[in-house]
Image: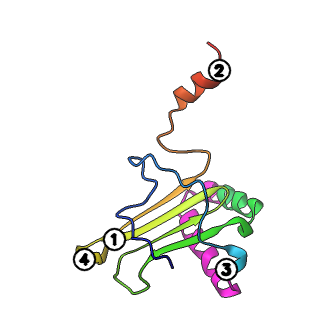
Amino acid sequence: MSSQEVPGDIITSAESGKRLVTPWGIRYPDLNKNQQELLKSMVCEFVFNMEFGKAQAEYAKIEKAGFENVYFGWIGAMEEKVSHYYIINGPTFLIEFDNNGGPRGTANHIHAIWREKGNEYGEDVLKKHYETEKH
C-alpha cells in the first residue's frame, strides 16, 4: 500500500501524455504463492477479454518476458467502496485500474486500461516515420 494520494483517473490516459517508464510496487517474485496466483489471475482477466488469437499471443509474450519482471503497485484504501488505484507493470504491458470519482473519496467510478508496450495509442506514427526515414 502507498501513502500517495489516489489519482483522479488512470495516470497514462491519452490526454495526460504521461508514460510510466519506471516500474514501482512489489515484484512478482516477492509475493507469496497465493498472491502470485492472484496477480496472474488479474492479468488474465485483462488479457483474455481480447479477441482469442490476440489474447493467446499477448499472454505468450508475457510468459516469454517472465512474470518475475512484473510489478504490482497499489495506492489508496483497502476497504471496499473507498478510492483506490492499482497498476500492474510488465515488460510488454501495462494495466491501470482506478476506482474513484465519488464524494469525499468514495469509490463508485471505475476506469481501467490495458496497454501493449511498443504499440502506444496516440503515438504520432507519421512524425516517427519522418524522424527515422529520409525523404
Camera-side mark, 1 or 4: 4
Left/right of residue 85 with respect to residue 105 in the rendered view = right
- Up the image or down, 89 lies above or below 129; here it is below
The residue positioned 42% from the left and 52% from the top of the image is 13
Of the image marks 4 and 3, the number of the one nearer the N terminus? 3
Q: CA distance from mark 2 to mark 3?
A: 44 Å
Residue marked by disc 4 = 104
Of the image marks 2 and 4, the number of the one nearer the N terminus? 4
Q: CA distance from mark 2 to mark 4?
A: 51 Å
Left/right of residue 35 with respect to residue 98 in the rendered view = right
Quadrant holding the C terminus: top right
Badge number at residue 100: 1
Residue marked by disc 3 = 36
Q: Position of residue 91 (x, y in %)?
A: 67, 57
Query: Magenta region: which residues?
Result: 31-55
Of the image marks 2 and 3, the number of the one nearer the N terminus? 3
- Up the image or down, 76 lies above or below 70; here it is below
Q: Position of residue 25 (x, y in %)?
A: 59, 71
* SS for callout 1: strand
Amino acid type, mark 1: Asn
* SS for callout 2: loop
Q: Residue furthest left?
A: 103
